[in-house]
Image: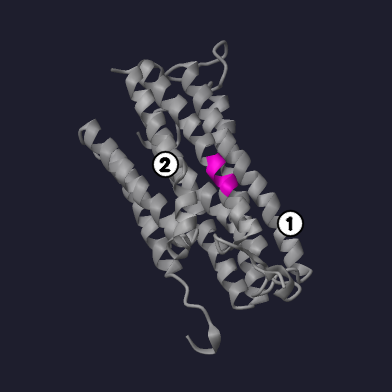
Amino acid sequence: MQNGEKAHPPYMLIWGILAILMFAKVGVSLVGMPKWLSVALLVMISLASALLVALYYMHLKFEQKRLWVLAAIPIPLIVIFILVVVQEFR
Amino acid sequence: MSHAATMPMGHDRPERGFDAYNAKLGMWVFLLSEIMFFTSLIGAYVILRFAHPDAFAQPGVVLNVPLTAVNTFVLICSSVTMVKAFAALEQDDQKGLKLWLLATIVLGAAFVGVQAYEYYHLVHDGFVPNAAAYAAPGGAIYGSTFYLMTGFHGLHVSIGVLCLIWILWKSNRGAFHSKRVAGVEAMGLYWHFVDLVWIVLFTIVYLI
C-alpha cells in the first residue's frame, strides 16, 4: 500500500460468506434430512461462521500468538464442561 | 526512560508482552468471561432439552424462523459496518468513521426492535416463561430457556447500542484518530462477539 495505508482483510467478502452460511443454515433446517445429519451440518456451519468472525472481524488472525493463547483459555474449560454434561446422559 | 514516557501524547500505548493496549487487552479478558457465561446458558439449555425432549417444540412450530433469519442477517450486516468504521478510523477518515458507526447503531437498534416485536407476538400466543400461564406447544421450560438466552443476548446488544452512541458522540468531539483507536477497536471486539454469540444461539435455539 502507498502512503503507509494498511491493507485490510476482505471485509465485504467475509460478510458475503457469512450471509451465505447463515441462509445455508436455514436451508439445512428446512430440508428433510436425518436429524443427526442436520444437527452435524448446522453445528459445523455455525462454527465456521463464528471462526470467520473471530479471525477476520475481531482480527485474531493478525494478532500475536500470545493473544491467541489468551483467547484460547476458555476452550479447555468448554471441553471439560461438555464432557461433564455428556456424563449426565450416559 | 520508560516506554510510556517516550509515547507521544494522545496515542494508545501497547502493553509489553501482548503488544496490545489496555482497552483491547481488557476487552479480551472480559470477553473470555462472557464466553463462559454464554456457555453456561447454552449448557443449561442442552441439558434441559435432552432431559425433557417433549417440552421443546420442533423448529418453526413456535418460533418465527424466517423473521429471525432476517434479523440475524441484520446483525451480520452490523458487524461489517462496525469493522468498516474501524477501517475508516485507521485511515483517518473521520466522516467514514461516523457514518459507519451510525449505520451500526441503526442496525443494532433494528435487531433489538425486531426482537421486541417477536417477544410481543410470542407472549400474545402464550409462549411465556411462566408455567401457570404457558399455552404454546412444548412446555414452560422451553419458554424459560428461550427468554433467558435470547433475553441476555438482547441485553448485550442493547448495551452495545448505547455504548456505540457514546462512541459516536466522542467521535463527533474528535476523540479518535489513526493513532488513537483503542476505544473504537475495543467496542468493535464487543460488537463482533455479540454477533458471534448470536450466530451460535440462532442455530441452537431456532434451527436445531
Residue closest to the far bottom = A2
Nearer to us in this view, A75 or B102:
A75
Q: Is residue B194 left or right of residue A53?
A: right
Check the image and report above or below for B143 versus B32. above
Report the span colored magenta: B29-34
Give the CA separation, mark 2 to mark 1.
Answer: 32 Å
Please state, as top left, top right, bottom left or bottom right, where the C terminus of chain B lies in the image.
top left
SS of the residue under disc 1: helix
* Type of amino acid at the residue the image marks with label 1: Trp
Residue closest to the far right = B173
- Report x, y in % for residue B193: 52, 49
Q: Residue at x 54, y 57 (%)?
A: B78
The reply to whether residue A26 is in sight is: yes
* Type of amino acid at the residue the image marks with label 2: Ile
SS of the residue under disc 2: helix
Nearer to us in this view, A35 or B133:
A35
Mark 1: give few (<14), some (14-19) or many (20+) Cα within 10 Å.
few
Q: Are marks 2 and 1 on the same chain?
A: no
Please state, as top left, top right, bottom left or bottom right, where the N terminus of chain B lies in the image.
bottom right
Label 1 lies in what chain? B
- Report x, y in % for residue B102: 65, 62
- Report x, y in % for residue A60: 46, 59
Res. B54 image quadrant:
top left
User: Does the segment drawn in magenta span residue B33?
Assistant: yes
User: Does the segment drawn in magenta span residue B75?
Assistant: no
Give the residue number, with chain letter if any, for mark 1.
B166
Give the residue number, with chain letter if any, for mark 2.
A75
Q: Is label 2 in contact with label 1 (beta carbons under 8 Å)?
A: no
Q: Majority secondary structure of the magenta segment?
A: helix
Count of numbered circles on the image: 2
Label number found at residue A17: none
- Report x, y in % for residue B26: 62, 51
